[in-house]
Amino acid sequence: MIKFDNVSKRYANGQEALSDISFEVSRGEFAFITGHSGAGKSTLLKLILAIQTPSSGQLIANGVNLNRVSAKQIAHHRRQIGTVFQDHQLLHDRSVYDNVALPLEICGYQPSDAARRVRAALDKVGLLKKEKSFPVALSGGEQQRVGIARAVVNRPSIILADEPTGNLDPGLSAEVMKVFQQFQSVGVCLLVASHDAALIERLNCRTIILEGGKLLADQKPRPQA
Amino acid sequence: MSATKPRTENPNQPRVKRNTRAGQSESFVDLVKRHRRIARGSASRLLQTPASSLVTLFVVAVALLLPALLFGLNSNLASLLAGFQDSAQVTLYLQDNVSVADGQKVSEGLLTRSDIEYAIYVSPSQALDEFGAASGLGDLLIEMTANPLPGAIVLTPADVSPLAVDELARQLQELPQVDVVQIDSLWLQRLAAISNLVSAIGSVLAVIVILGLFFVVGNTIKLAIENRKAEILVIKLVGGSDMYAARPFLYTGLLYGLGGGILATLLQGIVLATFNSNLEGLMQLYESGFQLRGFGLMSSLLIIVAGAAIGWAAALMASLRHIRAINP
Ligand SMILES: Nc1ncnc2c1ncn2[C@@H]1O[C@H](COP(=O)(O)OP(=O)(O)O)[C@@H](O)[C@H]1O
Ligand SMILES: [Mg+2]
């Protein structure tokens, strides 16, 4: 589903954010990307989302060769991916409902069909009562959950999440992870960047550890006792 | 937090199908509803900045008004010309050696031509009588031993357009009996030429105005896009195409064009009313009931539709260009 093949990313300022990364994540797999701040976690997700292009190596996600994509292909590619952004990226002049409905509107869903999906997604993150609120009226954690609802509303084939639990208390973090695991169970491929060691430890998923842009380790889940 | 399980379907395979299905099954009513929502959003954004919106609207209206007034003036001129059509006359002065009988024969011959409505022969003596009566020199003329006037044929062309009359005159000049062809409506031709000039100026002006509108609307759209950069960024991040992000701005351009067109037809009415009140005195002197008329419904509609189309096209060009440049 996602395949990194000796991928490096050097930013225009010369900063090498990723060097020689190779790994593969398949359908129905849930993997954490972890590492210190500046390790290259966000850069890795940005490459998959075609926000950045690899400087070298080959990257294929969802059958799309991300070394060479047109603007049109990029839009289509992103529609297949649900993304939780570190900085939420919500529309501040639209209600929670409209924010979550955005991916559906882009795909041209019927309003009645969309309404059902939006409410289901908001229900999953416990924000059903806030659908008429505007993002400014929400706490950081609530905004983050709106972002999560928007990421899953279109039933994507890949979910990327950049520090999705950064603003959430442990209880809510666990709830969000449960939502992610439901998607894993229906074949969605999940890649979650996080430095929440306790959470990663508890969930016992595959963990890819980055350090200074290099792949330090790719740990498989511990066998269940 | 309830844990409604996502539907157990393969999330990859049915995706394309699902999207096309959603696209296809969107009924016409839904489509109209969706576009109406976007249009309403664009309109309410315009109302949020009433002063600058009004200025743009006014600029668009004045730009549309200028060529519209010229074309309007021209269509008035054309109808004025049409009113004088009957007076288009051609006089053929015949050679001295053409007898009265021959002259009459030529005149009757001309009547059979399809491009001639009416022709009448005027003999030299009739011409002298008429001249005498008209000039009041009748008695004096009787004293003359020889009649200096030639015989003539006065005719009305079937087609009185300047081009057709010219062509007819050229053909009649070829007749052996004809000495001189005189078109009695030369001033009409001059007026027609002026009318053509006005219409040519109007066309050039229209081109300039369209370019100007592209610039004005394009610039307004560019500013609007800069103000909503963050929103466009989010739309692109979740997979919205450039065209999707451009849609509200297309409505903005369309509304500017539409509103400008409507305002232009209103302004034009005011301009014509002002002209007419001045024209009245002048036309009374000429005992003419002539009045400048408005564009009529069709022409007003044309201005509005043209304004809307130009506004939309200008917005399309500007928004696709500027939205393409916005990237995460
Ligand atoms: N747009 C950018 N231009 C230049 N350097 C960048 C850019 N984004 C990130 N970096 C650098 O790349 C490295 C990796 O950053 P990032 O991927 O954000 O790490 P993480 O998400 O793990 O904290 C950092 O040293 C950061 O300063
Ligand atoms: Mg980061």
Image: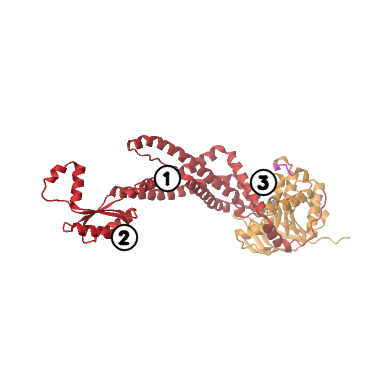
Task: Please tell me the colour of chain B.
Answer: red
Q: Callout 1, which amino acid?
A: Gly
- Chain hosting mark 2: B
In this image, A65 relative to A219: left or right? left
Q: Position of residue A197 (x, y in %)?
A: 79, 52
Looking at the rendered image, the disc whose residue lies closer to the viewer, 3 or 1, is 1
Query: What mark, if any, has residue A20 been given in the picture?
Result: none
Q: Report, in whole angstroms, how far the alpha carbon at label 3 lies from the one at label 2.
A: 78 Å
Amino acid under disc 2: Arg
Cα distance between the residues tagged 2 and 1: 36 Å
User: Dot 1 falls on which chain?
Assistant: B
Front-most of A84 and A210?
Answer: A84
Query: Label 3, on which residue?
Result: A91
Q: Nearer the viewer, residue B223 or B147?
A: B147
Residue at (67% x, 46% y) in the render: A91
Task: Give the chain coloured orange.
Answer: A
Task: Where is residue B63? Give x, y as percent.
Answer: 46, 44
Crowdedness of circle 1 by 10 Å Cα count: few (<14), some, many (20+)? many
Q: Which residue is mark 2?
A: B113
Q: CA distance from mark 3 to mark 1?
A: 48 Å
Secondary element at tag 1? helix
Residue B195 in view in this figure: yes
Which part of the image, by quadrant, shows the N terminus of chain A?
A: bottom right
Of callouts 2 and 1, the N-terminal one: 1
In the rendered image, residue B156 lying in the magenta stretch gets the answer no
- Residue B15, image x and y in percent? 71, 61
Q: Would you say A95 lies left or right of A172 here?
A: left
Instruction: In this rendered view, identify the residue nearer to me: B203 or B125.
Output: B125
Does the magenta-highlighted stretch encompass residue A133?
yes
Q: Which residues are magenta?
A: A131-135
* Residue beneath disc 1: B72
